Image (cartoon, coloured by chain):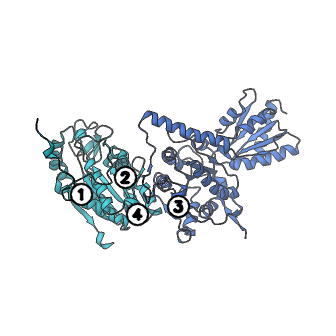
Amino acid sequence: MADTTQFEVAETEANLVYSRPRLLLDTTMHYCPGCSHGTVHKLVAEAIDELGAEDKAIGITPVGCAAFLYNYIDIDWVQASHGRAPSVATAMKRLCPDKLVFTYQGDGDLAAIGTAEAIHAANRGDNIAIIFINNAIYGMTGGQMAPTTLLGMKTATTPQGRDADLNGYPFKVANVLSLLDGVTYVTRQSVNTPANVRKAKKAIKKAFDNSINNRGLSFVEIVATCNSGWKMSPIAANHWMEENMHAAYPLGDLKDLTGDK
Amino acid sequence: MEDIKLMKGNEVLAYAAIRCGADGYFGYPITPQSEVLETLTELRPWETTGMVVLQAESEVAAINMVYGGASAGKRVLVSTSSPGLSLMCEGLSYLAGAELPCVVIDVSRGGPGLGTIQASQADYFQVVKGGGHGDYHTPVLAPNSVQEMNDFVDLAFDLAFKYLNPVVILADGVIGQMMEKVHLSPQKPRRTEEQIRQECPWAALGKGSRTQRNIITSCYIDPETMEHHNHKLQAKYDQMVREEVRYEAMETADAEYILVAYGASSRICAKVVEDARRDGLKVGLIRPITLFPFPSAPIREAAAHAKGFLSVELSMGQMIEDVQLAVGNASIPVRHFGRTGGIIHSPREVYTALKQFMTETGGL
């Protein structure tokens, strides 16, 4: 039998290159393997920690796959009804202006049932951050069409593919919000490569910093995979996203007035 | 020094909100209660007490703003009228499920549908029986004077924080729009964040110096946990039934016929009792002040010597079901009388209906 002791390495500050973020709880996530949510949760936890905002962070969770986000990050949370997280956040931030207040919403929650609340919070310039996960499908309810579903894309409620005549067009929420004067920062990111993960984290951190410092509304869209809903392997889903989703939803900043506020 | 004013019920709600130390008001204009938001923006409390006043884009947004403020342990309220309350019912269910304190004011108007902007009491079922989904109740206070519009705001907040539950003030367009003399309450200070952290250790205010995070939710996926939560909520509703019943009784001790009426109708019925007594008829009035919990006990006690009950409502008959349950004796007739469409019944027509009822049931 081989001697395995030679592989034991003591963990020291010098050789530690990666660990679970301090605020990310040691809880098994309910997400499907390959889902982007886990990665984005990690970035949210890291951003809050690096901003030193653990004591004043209040997150608003949606209805959808991320409803149980409050189980995973060690800050105060409020679970909102479907689509209403921006209204909850609006009041929270106005009543507690020194806090970091953010919502974390999927495309069904924010871009369908909660469109009015998102647009009006943005138009009022409420000092909140919105993390918007766009995976072009309803994950929690089993893969139905979302407003962001691509044309031709097959879902449980578009079995022949999304037809523009019947279902309209993919909703480019970030583009709409970037037109509103109350909005400071709108960016579209993805977490498909290590480089993009780093960029996404930078964007989330900026959005949170804007909330803490009352610089208007920040909106970070994450173009994400839902390999279960898309019925693909995690790797195939990543490739499909790069080829199709990134074409329909190009990555990068759509608006950034952070420096002016 | 006493602060006595002549004021509309709706305006008084605004003054009472500021003076009871509320942290935030969120509302959407709807007749016949738009004066609440208008008066608040005129008074600009954000410059004095620091109270936040915000016009939301809809009643749906407004009630969820209340949910947000309540989650932080703040004293927050919203006012609306019937169609607006319909839109808020989902939010009320979430507030009750998440055990959040807040005050919701319904200055009700006629329906169904767009109905009428005139006064009505047809929201009884919606407000008193829940409105939203799931097993929940909210205490419901029914003012019948402008003075009570003042007094019940602070009382509603006390109940809301005692039970960690939404409390509804169910007024009607008459009480909202009419002017009366009112003694305004003295100004109470708003609580500091430190006081809220102490009084509401559950509040999501950021962890601060806490080691445990707070989570505000109404979601319980595990069946046993959900049922346990339902039992916990029910225990609060049972306590409300034991401790919070409020009512007024007028001339009921020897009454053979009892009028049961709340809000504007109870003012009209008080006049009917005076007229009937002057005519030598043994008529009394029970006026529920809390519609939930309903004053079933005094009605049941009066049933021991009563020949009949007349539920007088500005509706087609909704509270009458609770009166029937309270009487609990099918041999004692319970009848409804009411007008709708914004028509307010006159004391004379209530009296006529009462005498008709008495004639038909052997009381005259």
Lower position in the chain sequence, tag 2 or tag 1: 2
Q: Nearer the viewer, mark 2 or mark 1?
A: 2
Tag 3: residue type?
Gly
Query: In the displayed structure, does residue A233 sit left or right of residue B346?
Result: left
Which image quadrant for residue B338? top right
The chain ID associated with circle 4 is: A
- Which of the pair B314/B145 is nearer the observer? B145
Lower position in the chain sequence, tag 4 or tag 1: 4
Q: Secondary structure at mark 4?
A: helix
- Cα separation between marks 4 and 3: 17 Å
Q: Determine whether label 4 and label 2 are within 8 Å by CB.
A: no
Mark 2, other Cα within 10 Å: few <14 / some 14–19 / many ≥20: many
Q: Nearer the viewer, mark 2 or mark 3?
A: 2
Q: Can you identify the residue that label 3 sits on? A: B24
Mark 4, other Cα within 10 Å: few <14 / some 14–19 / many ≥20: some
- Cα separation between marks 4 and 2: 29 Å
Q: Determine whether label 3 and label 1 are within 8 Å by CB.
A: no
Q: Which mark is residue A200?
A: 1
- Are the residues flagged by discs 3 and 1 from a single subunit? no
Chain shaded cyan: A
The colour assigned to chain B within the rendered structure: blue
Q: Quadrant of the N terminus of chain B?
A: bottom right
Q: Can you identify the residue that label 2 sits on? A: A74
